[in-house]
Amino acid sequence: MKYNFDEIINRKDSHSIKWSNLEKTYGDKDILPMWIADMDFKVADEILEGFMERVNHGVFGYDYRPASYYEAVINWVKKRHGWDIKKEWILFTPGVVMGLNLAVVTLTKKREKIIIQPPIYPPFSGVISRNERAILTNPLRHNGEKYIMDYNDLEKKIDNDTKLMLLCSPHNPTGRVWAKDELEKLGEICLKNNIIIVSDEIHSDLIFKGHKHTTIASISEELAMNTITLMAPSKTFNIAGLFTSVAIIPNKEIRDKFVKTIEILGIDHNSTFGAVGLEAAYNHGETWLEEVLEYIEDNLDYTMEYVKNNIPKITIDRPEGTFLVWLNCTKLGLSQEELNELMIKTGKVLLNDGMTFGKEGEGFLRLNIGCSRSTLEEALKRIEKAVKSLKN
Ligand SMILES: Cc1ncc(COP(=O)(O)O)c(C=O)c1O
């Protein structure tokens, strides 16, 4: 291994949302933060070198996105996902959640229905309700082994007001990496009902062994023309703070509308360092990614074993990708409030509240394992201590 992911880097003084303000919010500075989805690892040397070179230049006026920026995206998407995309399909968005917002305001009118599949990353419902559109929930179903899509429920609920689907692929928080046939079936339903798909593929580079990410737009020409794909180097390379993402839109009519919204809002300009970071990451970050994936998968093995052996009342479906683990705590028999309080007050560990992912997340917590092994060990010990403090 070239990189040492065991290294602990103090993030408390770096304005990190994950690590700062714990004392202010929870009245306890010793809380271990295992929530929000960024990693505690230092980025690839090649990204740092890209930044340094630009810093040494010393002038930071307005930059445009050069051809090399688009080539970096095209080459990465081809190499990692086998999808051939064209330069003109690629639009800049300042963050993936902004991409979701842009799609919602561009492609739907107030009160029209937009499909989501809870439990789901909270901004999916937030972007719909804040823009005064209607949320149509098509909850994932658990088949005893894993979460699956419920196509019957979806077909039953779709009506003429249903215009858009926000797909999370891979899925946060469940860690499902949707198989090609699952996406084909979903795609068929959307095509049949004239529902445009917005596929948030921010986690698509973080896939564990034995699984393969399929970009839904790459399945067929019809799906390419019906899909907006949102991608970013942010989760992949731990550079979420750069807010540099892309929307890939092969359909010119949809793309032109999207561009118009970007112009209306005046958000076409990326930061200098966003572009530098994206290019450095996609062009030179692959070794780091391969290594970090191995480290995270080892962390996952450790978590699965530890929880099975020491906290058997918590159960986990092994995630197929992402660095997030969805802890099923329903057997503890606590309300969500009690569960959150148990972890904060007794465990002194901060996890994401399952209910923020929708009512389908009741009794769950989300654990971020994108951290050094020693941090993870400490977090699991704290969760164990909290659970064992319960009588019976
Ligand atoms: C599925 C998903 N989409 C989007 C985001 C955030 O994207 P951004 O910070 O680029 O808006 C996250 C972060 O956790 C995520 O999990």
Image (tube, rainbow, N blue to C red):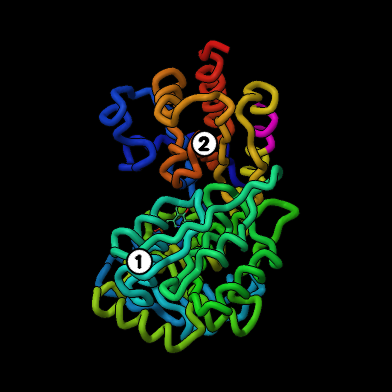
Q: Is residue 335 above or below residue 268?
A: above
Whichever of labels 2 and 1 marks the residue nearer the N terminus, that label is 1
What number is the disc on residue 40?
none
Query: For the residues carrying marks 2 and 1, which lies nearer the camera in this image?
Result: 2
- Which stretch appears magenta? 301-306
**Would the CB of label 1 be found within 8 Å of ligand 1?**
no
Q: Is residue 115 visible?
A: yes
Q: Residue at x 43, y 37 (%)?
A: 353
**Would the CB of label 2 be found within 8 Å of ligand 1?**
no
Residue situated furthest bottom in the rendering: 252
Magenta portion: prevailing SS class? helix
Describe residue 267's horizontal placement relative to residue 340 as left or right.
left
Amino acid tagged 2 = Phe
Residue situated furthest top in the rendering: 391
Marks 2 and 1, how far apart at CA: 27 Å
Question: Quick check: is 241 in the magenta stretch?
Answer: no
Q: Residue at x 52, y 58 (%)?
A: 138
Q: Is residue 185 above or below residue 306?
A: below
What number is the disc on residue 101?
1
Residue 82 on image: x %, y %: 66, 73
Describe residue 199's horizontal placement relative to residue 271 as left or right.
right
Q: Is residue 163 above or below residue 117?
A: below
> Would you name the residue on which mark 2 appears?
364
Residue situated furthest right in the rendering: 210
Q: Is residue 240 above or below residue 86?
A: above
Residue 335 on image: x %, y %: 45, 28
Amino acid tagged 1 = Asn
Q: Residue at x 47, y 71 (%)?
A: 159
Q: Residue at x 52, y 37 (%)?
A: 367
